Image (cartoon, rainbow, N blue to C red):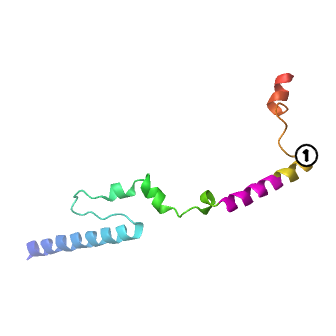
Amino acid sequence: MSAAAGGLRRLLAAAATAGAAEVRASIFGHALNPTGKRAATKLLRKKMVGDQVAQWYPYDIKRDDPLVMAREEKERLAKLEMLKRRGKGPPKKGQGRRAVKRSK
């Protein structure tokens, strides 16, 4: 009877560890592979490249619509003009920080 009890105990222990492994995999998002066979999980975890990335991101209207680009360019020029009026705009060519440093 003790041999049968030991076998039953081993069987229950194996079932408990298998159940714990399944629960652990579901909690932490791991792929459960009890048989040890090759799986595509490593391949699917890799970064997407090329066409896959292009399909993932939605269509960008800024790239093709000239009205959107024109509005953004107007906003950029208006901001640049405002900065120039306050004296915070970019320096004229040849009068930047590096040019001043070089002339000393």
Q: Can residue 48 be seen from the camera position used here?
A: no
Q: Residue at x 21, y 74 (%)?
A: 12
Say left or right for 17 vs 100: left
Q: Which residue is nearer to you in this view: 62 or 53? A: 62
Tell me where residue 89 appears, x and y as whole percent: 85, 45
Name the dominant secondary structure of the magenta segment.
helix
Quadrant location of the C terminus? top right
- Measured as percent of width and height from the top left, residue 72 is found at 73, 58
Residue type for callout 1: Gly
| Residue 34 visible somewhere in the drawing | yes
Secondary structure type for disc 1: loop
Quick check: 43 left or right of 90? left
What residue is shown with label 1?
A: 87
Q: Is residue 68 a member of the stretch shown in magenta?
A: yes
27, above or below 82, in the image: below
Q: How many marks?
A: 1
**x%, y% of residue 27?**
40, 70
Q: Residue at x 63, y 60 (%)?
A: 62
Between 47 and 39, the one lying in front of the other is 47
Point out the residue furthest to the front here. 66
Q: Is residue 93 above or below residue 77?
A: above
Q: Position of residue 53 (x, y in %)?
A: 46, 57
Residue 61 picture quarter: bottom right
Give the image quarter of residue 35.
Answer: bottom left
Work out which residue is located at the far bottom of the displayed protein and give it: 1
Q: Which of the two residues, 97 or 13, is positioned nearer the viewer here?
A: 97
Is 73 left, or right, of 53 in this rendering? right
- What segment carries the magenta color? 66-79
Is residue 53 one of those drawn in magenta?
A: no
Give neighbour class at mark 1: few <14, some 14-19, many 20+ (Cα, 10 Å): few
